[in-house]
Image: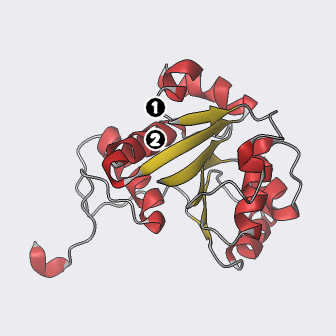
Amino acid sequence: MKRIIVGATGASGLPLLIDVLRIIRENADDGWRSTLILSDSSQTTLQWETGLSVSDVRELADDWYEPTEIGARPASGSYPTAGMVVVPCSMKTLAGIHSGYAENLLLRAADVTIKEQRPLVLCTRESPLSPIHLRNMQELSSIPGVRIMPPVMNFYGHYTSIEEMTYSIAARLLSPFGITASGYQGWEGLEER
């Protein structure tokens, strides 16, 4: 079994979380499982952006924990995971990860992921970026295994809907773990067109 901790914060971008969980579920036959931690703020944004309830989203995950469960299994390096993705990752959460301020389970799980040298993908969401945001991202990106992956769209995929674009970004967020999304088509080179 290959488990990914999936954290979500209150930043805009919760449709990406839904696709990330669905893609992990699509890869269950390859042993992939998800452990979900929704911050309190994400639960508010979730309803606004997706129309889904917290229980709807928890059903997409294999396991889930409340952010207040600081003593739960993901708070320990002995909890075996392939790494963690935070999607979306607010600047507040980014700052907490950057400073090691593990005040809740989501921040503690990210802290553990770094200390255990497992992959940590941060789908940072903010615009414009302040010098503080950029400094936090730059310093975190210098840690082996930490990837800063804002939800940047591409145009070479010739997407016809926002849903296709969202799926593409979600697929790219999971690529560092070796997960392949069935509906994702990456760059094939100009000679293929």
Q: Is residue 133 rendered to the left or right of residue 124?
A: right
Q: How is the image coloured?
A: secondary structure
The location of residue 31, given as percent across then percent down, is 40, 52
Amino acid beneath label 1: Leu
Q: Which one is nearer the viewer's eye here, 57 or 34?
A: 34
Residue at the image point whose x is 22% and y is 55% from the top? 158
At 56% across and 59% down in the image, what residue appears? Answer: 150
* Residue 32 percent coordinates (x, y): 43, 51
Quadrant for residue 36, please give it: top right
Distance from disc 2 to disc 1, alpha carbons, whole Å, reads: 6 Å
Horizontally, is 70 left or right of 64 in the view? right
Q: Which amino acid does label 2 sit on?
A: Leu
Which of the pair 69/104 is nearer the observer? 69
Secondary structure type for disc 1: loop
* Quarter residue 77 falls in: bottom right
Tell me if label 2 and label 1 are in contact, CB under 8 Å.
Answer: yes
Residue 55 location (% of width, % of height): 55, 19
**Relative to residue 97, is residue 17 depicted above or below?**
above
Residue 44, position as x, y percentages in the image: 67, 24
First in sequence, mark 2 or 1: give its number. 2
Crowd band around label 2 with a 10 angstrom C-alpha radius: few (<14), some (14–19), many (20+): many
Q: Look at the image and tell me whether residue 93 can be seen.
A: no
For mark 2, give the secondary structure.
helix
Quick one: quadrant of the C terminus? Answer: bottom left
**Label 1: few (<14), some (14–19) or many (≥20) C-alpha neighbours in 10 Å:** many
Which residue in the protein does label 1 denote?
60
Q: Name the residue under label 2.
A: 21
